[in-house]
Image (cartoon, rainbow, N blue to C red):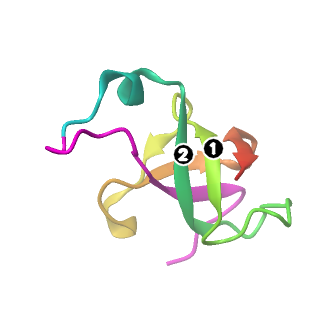
Amino acid sequence: MILLKDYIVVKPLIEEKTSGGIILASAVTDKQMKGEIVLKGKDVEDGDIKVGAIVLFDKMNSTPAPEPFGEGLKLCQEEDILAIL
């Protein structure tokens, strides 16, 4: 599968859980989310954005990735990456 343009597939990393696995409200309501880059398009110009990098991205502008990419993944554009951690 080929990802076109400047799109990036991100696997969200939710760290704010209780020991029972309940996601805390602050993790759900944040506009920013931490994630790991799974796949990037050929037109992504920033050389620091690499597969496997942990990034902070704008989850309000991200979209659930289509089925072929996998469940729970987000699709966003290069400008939605706010920081590389």
- Residue at image position (33%, 53%) is 72
- Residue at image position (44%, 51%) is 13
Can you identify the residue that label 1 sits on?
Answer: 56
In the drawing, does residue 32 fall left or right of residue 70?
Answer: right
Q: Which residues are magenta?
A: 1-21
The secondary structure making up most of the magenta span is loop
Residue 11 picture location, percent across and down: 45, 57
Circles 1, 2 touching at the beta carbon (< 8 Å): yes
Residue 64 picture location, percent across and down: 40, 46
Q: Which callout, 1 or 2, points at the residue further toward the start of the chain?
A: 2
- Residue at image position (29%, 59%) is 71
Query: Which quarter of the figure has residue 49?
Result: bottom right
Q: Nearer the viewer, residue 2 or 16?
A: 16
Query: Which quarter of the figure has residue 37?
Result: bottom right
Residue 28 picture location, percent across and down: 36, 28
- Kindly report the distance in space between the C-alpha atoms of the residues bearing marks 1 and 2: 5 Å
